[in-house]
Every structure is written in C-alpha cells, then in structure tokens.
Image: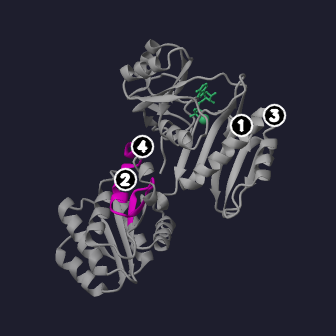
Amino acid sequence: MNIHEYQAKELFDRFQVPSPKGQVASTPEEAAEAARQFAGSKLVIKAQVHAGGRGKGHFKNGFKGGVHLIDSPEQAAEFAAKMLNETLVTVQTGESGRLVRKVMIAEAVDITHEYYLAILMDRASCRPVIVASTEGGMNIEDVAHGSPEKIFRQAVHPLLGLQPYEVRKVTAALGLSGDLAKQFSKLLANLYKLFLECDCSMLEINPLVTTPDGRVLALDAKFGFDDNALYRHPEIVAMRDKEEEDPREVAASEYDLNYIGLDGNIACLVNGAGLAMATMDVIKHFGGEPANFLDVGGGASKEQVTAAFKIILGDPKVKGIMINIFGGIMDCNIIAEGVIAAAKETGLPIPLVVRLEGNNVEAGKAALKASGINITTAATMAEAAEKIVALVN
Ligand code: ADP
Ligand code: MG
C-alpha cells in the first residue's frame, strides 16, 4: 500500500522528521484558504498522486509541471484550478497518467543542496538498506543509471538496529559536517524508527535538502507499506486511497484474492501462486498474453471464486478465460460452483477453457457439464492453453 505526500507528512511529524508545513486541498477555494494559513511565507503547490516525477510531469490539458512555486492565495486558487481534476502524466505514471484529486499547499524553502535518502527492504541481503546520494532531486534515475558510484548503500542488521557508526558513514557519504551532520544523524535515526515501527517496505525522500539558514528538511516523501503487516496499523490503513489503485486489484483485495492486473487478453483463474505463474508461462508459450495473475488460494470459497470470475469479466481487455485448477486441498466442485454462479449472473460472453484435476474432480466436472454453460474442457495444462489461445485468436 502507498500513501500521498501530505499523509506522509503526518508520519514525519509523529516521528520528528523535519519537513515544511503543508495542507491538503481538493478545491481552488480550499487551496486559497490553505495558502492564507501560511501567510508571510513563500509557498509551493504540489499535485498529490501516488507517483513521482511530478515536477517534470505535464498535464493532458497542456499545463506543465505538477509542482510550482506560488506567492499568494489567489495564485494558489489559480494553479489549483489548472491541476485539480486534470490528468498528470509523469515518467512513473505511464501514458495514461493519473487524475489529480488533491493538491498540497506547503511552505517553500530556499534550497542549498538536494540530497537523496531512502530506506528499503532489500530481499537479497534480507536487511533494511539505507540508500543515499549527494545527487538528489529530479534526475536521480539518470544518476543511478549513469554514475551508480554516486549512490551509497548501508545495510542495517535487523536485530542490532541502526548503529551510530553506520549513521556516521551515511553522513560522511553525503559530505555533511558540523551542525548539519548533527541534524541529519537525528533525522536518519528517526526515519529508521519510522520505517520499522510502521512496517514500511520502502521510504524515499527525494529531495532531502539543506537550507541557507542551516536546516535539514524532507521536501518530498514516497512511502510503501508491507501489506502483510497492515493489520497492525489501522491508522495507516485509514490513509489508503483506493482511487489511486487499480480498481481490479481493489475488488480482489476485498475478497482476499491474490490478483495482479496485466496487459494481455487471456484471463487466468488458478489456485496457488506457483501454478498461476506456470499457467501464465504456458499461455505465453502458445503465443497468448495473460491478462492477469490470479491465485484464489488453497481454501477458496464459492463466493471468492464467483468474485474472482466477475473481476475477470469486468475487464474489457479480456477476450478469453483459462481456468487451471489442481485440487490438492481445493475442492474442484467449489470452483465449479463459483464459476457456474458467476457465469449465470454475467452470461459469459467470451470463451472459457477449464482444466480441473484433483480433489473431488468428478463432481466438479459433472456440475459444469450439467450447468449447460458453454465450456471447453481440457485434460492437461498445455491442452488448455493451446485451446484458449486458439479461441481468442
Ligand atoms: P517529484 O519528485 O514528484 O517531482 P518533489 O516533491 O520532489 O516532486 O518536487 C520537485 C522539486 O520541487 C524538488 O526537487 C524541489 O526542488 C522542489 N520542491 C518541492 N517541494 C518544495 C518546497 N516545499 N520548497 C521548495 N522547493 C520544493
Ligand atoms: Mg521528488
């Protein structure tokens, strides 16, 4: 799960990670009102979407940039009107872009230097890793590509925790000294605490800045959380913005289904992640393109299967469905009942190939046959994939 920058600020405040004051707004009037609250300071207006690269992005209405310096409440309203309910395209959103539903008005600060600072869970070393660079700002991707030696990494032992000498190494890598080093050390320790206590999977501040008046501040924030740990953070779950997520994935998460939308046109409904991957591979092997990864799990109920089937059918790109079930724990008849219920509700307008094997398979096959729905059956996984690819083409 991800959150918006204005929400990340709440977490920064809670963990004493310094950042400029900000206020979210959904209308130009609210933007002007927020700007009035910060009267006297220079201001910035920032589009709030779950994607970076906003500064260099552009709106489909022709307006350039999702981050702007402004200097009055009137200008806040004027810029908000150009950004709100408009689609922002950045390097991270893809061509379709993201609809901007909120903007943040924040205090603008003078910048001496922009740094990059992130903490992420590194699967290779099984540790949190601090990533830092002196070359922060809007071109960090180019730096990672062109001069990777400018990116410093410091792994942290998960049980020992962040050690003072590790903090000193990161501080030195950023070339900070004196009072700035002191402020940065405190910020990093607090940020690490935030990362652990909130079960983040990644946390990125780009840029982290130093200012002419000698402060160290987080100017941007991108957070990812470990979905498996969300149950112990109701206050973070409350920040979820479902409008920023793939609607197919939102529906799937409501039914506890493991679903990931893809770009192809052959939907798969499978039990078990390994089998789901193999099914996608075999579809590709026969020249097809999977429309999704969908694992209904080992103990799915009829309701879950029905929901899964409806999510698949709700995707206009889907031109055919392949069901591939190996019932080790899963009862094949439950799959059959779920499919029949969903097909009866939706009418099943596209080809469906079913391969069932395992626990209670005879009952499942008999139920499908008796239902009268138009189903192509297959005895093996390869046969099923070959058939669905042929039907879709
Ligand atoms: P993104 O990474 O999506 O482009 P940022 O929040 O990093 O968005 O903003 C882009 C740039 O705008 C930053 O690199 C920084 O130079 C400037 N900026 C962002 N917030 C502020 C602020 N509060 N004060 C001054 N400049 C800012
Ligand atoms: Mg940024």
**Cα–Cα gap, marks 2 and 3:** 48 Å
Of circles 2 and 1, which is in front? 1
Nearest the eye: 224 or 190:
190
Q: Specify the quarter for ligand 1.
A: top right
Q: Earlier in the sequence, mark 3 or mark 1?
A: 3
Which residue in the protein does label 1 denote? Answer: 183
Tell me if 172 is positioned left or right of 325 in this view. Answer: right
Contact (Cβ within 8 Å) of mark 4 with mark 2: no
Please, what is the three-letter code of the amino acid marked with disc 3?
A: Gly
Q: Residues within 10 Å of mark 2 (few under 14, many from 20)?
A: some
Q: Which mark is residue 250?
A: 2
Q: Earlier in the sequence, mark 2 or mark 3?
A: 3
Of circles 4 and 1, which is in front? 1
Q: Residues within 10 Å of mark 3 (few under 14, many from 20)?
A: few
Q: Position of residue 100 (x, y in %)?
A: 42, 32
Quarter of the image with the C terminus in it: bottom left
Residue drawn where x is 74% and y is 36% of the image:
135
Please, what is the three-letter code of the amino acid marked with disc 4?
A: Glu
The magenta segment is: 241-268
Residue drawn where x is 68% and y is 24% of the image:
111
